[in-house]
Amino acid sequence: MDATSAPHLIPPEMPQYGEANHIFEMMQNLLEQLLIYQPQDPIPFMIEHLSRDNDNVPKIVILGPPASGKTTIAMWLCKHLNSNLLTMENLIEKEFSHLASEAKNHYQKFKKVPSTLLVRLIHERLKDEDYIKRGWILDGIPETREQALMIQTLGIMPRHVIVLSAPDTVLIERNVGKRIDPRTGEIYHTTFDWPPEPEIQDRLAMPEGISEMETAQKLLEYHRNIVRILPCYPKILKVISSDQPCVDVFYQALTYVQTNHRSNAPFTPRVLLCGPVGSGKSLQAALLAQKYGLVNVCCGQLLKGAVADRSNLGELIRPFFEKDMAVPDSIIMKVLTHRLKEQDCVQKGWVLHGFPRDLDQAHLLDSLGHKPNRVFFLNVPLDSVIERLTLRRTDPVTGERYHLMCKPPPTMEIQARLLQNPKDAEEQVKLKMDLFYRNSAELEEFYVDAITINADQDPYTVFEYIESGIINPLPKKIF
């Protein structure tokens, strides 16, 4: 585009298409792959990469000290995500691989594999079609900073890195209590998992290398290495305490690996606030508009503005206002569409409240191309709404608004002349609440990625939750 002809009138459909199909992330990933592999002919390489459609497969590294449970968590994640587990043991056991045979011989002699050989082995394995299609989980690798940098140099980039941690005293207790059944290979523990059968108890043996002194030595080596590994993975690393039930550790790990990292893609917020009367939608919309420059689109105010301007649409709306009747959806959508298509809404983004109120209106909004990319449901109990609204009063002399509990009038004289809006009567509030919750279930089903927020708390706390939901990627649903 010619910069001298700015501002450009960008159709609203263009950014919506880019967001819906993750065009920015796709191009960014494609560029990364081109720079890493530097193919002689980029076009066939790009076609092959795009045809794989594997940008979102698991690529996970799990690190942790001895006895932290990293192998158990890795195995559970592997099963849940239908991915491939890579451990030192299964790397060197691969048949018909010269590298695996060399690594196995070295491991049998020295109980370790040289870093160069290990990284080459990982690189070879990750070229397998199954690893390309279903992703991978590295258990306990890299062990050193040298290995981490070598892995990165080959273009092997994890999306999520999990580090398990626990006090050394806990880890030593776990490790020294391990016992193995030489007949079945099952692992037991003297404190946490002791077999009830006497015959199994009698044949249990203590594995090699798990004495208190040996475990302390391994922990010392781990702590020396891990502080140098962590800086290799900024922004994609999460530390989880493993000094808690294994199931809790697993669900924390699963939640993390199913979370998208914040994207660098251009993002224009299109926010929809849903909630009953008195839930604070207007206040939250005003705060968002003030902080982020979004256009505050209140459906009710738009209709009133059209009537006040005496526009053609306003003249259509006026009879409904005068008779206190609901304005037809078709007229509302004409007013709303005209506003949302204006250039400030397209460029800055918008925050809409007061519409849609039911499923039909939601479908109508969606069909006309006005799709919000963030939807929030503000939940407030009936008692709190009644307290918020029925105690509101207005001074007819000054126009000042008061609340008998939160902002009482300063003098008895003012209090004596305060008036209540008929719409704030308890019966009216209950009717509106009932109408909202009658339709809210269908709206929540329609907006599957909506975020529900407890709005019965300090409004600035509610704003922080909304802000977090806008800034961060939408969480994936865990089934």
Image (cartoon, rainbow, N blue to C red):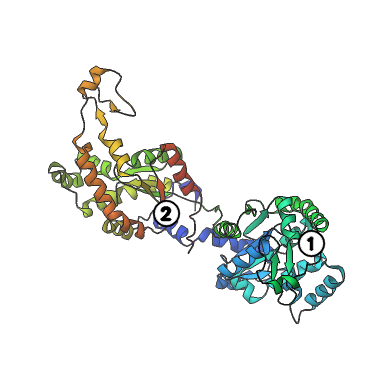
> Residue 65: percent from the left, percent from the top?
73, 56
Question: Residue at label 2?
Answer: 373
Mark 1 / mark 2, whichever is N-terminal: 1
401 relative to 434, above or below: above
Q: Is residue 303 left or right of residue 76?
A: left
For the residues labelled 1 and 2, the Cα–Cα distance comes to 53 Å
Count of picture labels: 2
Q: Quadrant of residue 39?
A: bottom right
Disc 2 on helix, strand or loop?
loop
Query: In this view of the protein, which residue sits in the foreground, 95 or 47?
Result: 95
Q: Quadrant of residue 174?
A: bottom right
Neighbour tally class for label 1: few under 14, some 14-19, many 20 plus, Cα within 10 Å = many
Question: Residue at label 1?
Answer: 210
231 relative to 421, above or below: below
Neighbour tally class for label 2: few under 14, some 14-19, many 20 plus, Cα within 10 Å = some
Amino acid on which the number 1 mark rests in the picture: Ile
The answer to whether residue 309 is visible is no
Query: In this view of the protein, which residue sits in the foreground, 153 or 217?
Result: 217
